[in-house]
Image: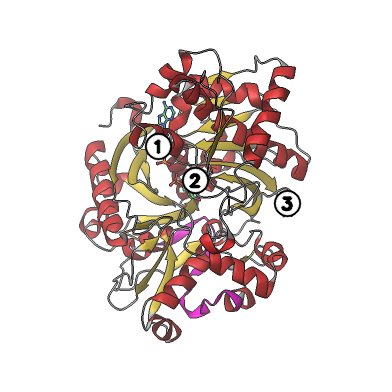
Amino acid sequence: MTDAHTAGPFVAAIDQGTTSSRCIVFDRDGRIVSVDQKEHEQIFPKPGWVEHDAIEIWTNVQEVVAGAVEKAGITRDDIKAIGITNQRETTVLWDRNTGEPVHNAIVWQDTRTDALCRELGRNAGQDRFRRETGLPLASYFAGPKARWLLDNVEGLRERAEAGDILFGTMDTWVIWNLTGGVDGGHHVTDVTNASRTLLMNLHTMQWDEKIAESIGVPPAMLPEIRSSAEVYGEITGGKLGGLLGGVPVASALGDQQAALFGQTCFSEGEAKSTYGTGTFMVMNTGDKIIDSCSGLLTTVGYRIGDEQPVYALEGSIAVTGALVQWMRDQMGLISTAAEIETLALSVEDNGGAYFVPAFSGLFAPYWRSDARGVIAGLTRYVTKAHLARAVLEATAWQTREIADAMTKDSGVELTALKVDGGMTSNNLLMQTLSDFLDAPVVRPMVAETTCLGAAYAAGLAVGFWNSTDDLRANWRRAAEWTPRMDAADRDRAYKNWLKAVERTMGWLDEDES
Ligand SMILES: Nc1ncnc2c1ncn2[C@@H]1O[C@H](COP(=O)(O)OP(=O)(O)O)[C@@H](O)[C@H]1O
Ligand SMILES: O=P(O)(O)OC[C@H](O)CO
């Protein structure tokens, strides 16, 4: 509920995430006024396949927005704008006339397009895609997922070519529905989400028709690419029309870029790392499109209205918090995620064990879909407590590899890392991270940086905040960890980690993926 310290007006943000959708209402100081959240089903039709029901997601989004507004005890007149942030790359195609998805959404973690990506690479050349889009050809990205749907849902390609089918990442799906759906919903995406499709040209910020043609996606189904902070339309659709009709929908940012924004990394060289299911480190590179030689992605950080776009380098790690979940749900070695810290603290070190969670191959900096997980260095000495340490260290070492790659590509030495996400409540992990990076690690007061970033962008678009300087003033440090590890110990352990990583590769034969 609102109180004297959180007098309106407010902005709201929707975070349509991989496991849940949430809505948060913020006040002008960037403080949380209310939160509502709802999980959706994870659908695993085959090994390596991950799907979501886009209708369930839209229903949940409406419920959490209504829930957050109700908990805040406010009305539409108190909300100046609503922003969207979302799990990136997850792809949904739907019929523009009925609003019905033609298939479940294919989630970013889904690897069904591995073979297709290899074939595209053989035909068109990996380098061409990287040069124009900043991305390697990998099953992670949206374009090949759309192509898979067009090839596998009967009659879909003809309907798409006739202009009856719309493509969207989750930002596009949510905005189209919020702004009216079949009754004139706006079919738009923002530059950050578009930069994850393998279809947008990083230099022109428009769809690259030649690339779309070689991937096999008809341009007629693609949304209009807009900036990350501008009014796309007003809430008119669905159950929310009555509650919040007329509220401007004023931002869209992929969740990792939203976290960069929420952490106020507005200057070149500033970086943040978000620790959730996976981990994503993003560094602001200003107006520079850095062509990574080290396996990082070149992506768009954000674009405010008609200002110049701000580019970024990203290191994406597929499995970090998901490994803790695996220890809990599949192995039963802990009963809550937080318990991993207590277990790990019951021993001094990892007992010689290194755990590389290449469950769906390795993302940055390797991009190896043939890799699978290993635990290396096992002896009879190793207990589940040592494994708990190895699990936490896996997150920290993977971050170290990304940080090294960022320094190599950008020439910027990491002086401190801003962190956020569910795993940052783990003190041992944060200390280990600082030790392995040999740099301070800082966590802000508002840990919900993803929603905060979307709220900031929406607020800037409608003049609720005037400039990024206003936003910087809201950032406050809650905790800091500084390095305590002996340099020689760190170097020795890092060497072992890299040896363990090598042992994951080439596990799958080409015809097995
Ligand atoms: N104390 C903890 N120690 C280690 N991992 C944790 C802890 N608490 C939560 N996690 C992990 O963090 C993830 C949830 O974080 P969250 O930011 O909500 O993720 P997402 O946005 O990807 O759903 C889960 O994978 C969970 O295993
Ligand atoms: O929903 P999250 O937090 O797991 O983030 C997913 C990423 O956007 C995938 O690129």
Instruction: Kindly indicate whether the residue at mark 2 contacts the one at mark 1 (C-beta within 8 angstroms).
Output: yes
| Residue 331 x/y as whole percent | 37, 33
| Residue 172 x/y as whole percent | 42, 63
Segment tinted magenta in the rendering = 214-233
Q: CA distance from mark 2 to mark 3?
A: 25 Å
Circle 1 crowding by C-alpha within 10 Å: few under 14, some 14–19, many from 20: some
First in sequence, mark 2 or 3: give its number: 3
Label 1 sits on residue: 326
Q: CA distance from mark 1 to mark 2?
A: 10 Å
Secondary structure beneath dot 1 equals: helix
First in sequence, mark 1 or 2: give its number: 1
Secondary structure beneath dot 3 equals: loop
Does the magenta segment cover residue 232? yes
Label 3 sits on residue: 292
Label 2 sits on residue: 359
Instruction: Kindly indicate whether the residue at mark 1 contacts the one at mark 3 (C-beta within 8 angstroms).
Output: no
| Residue 293 x/y as whole percent | 75, 51
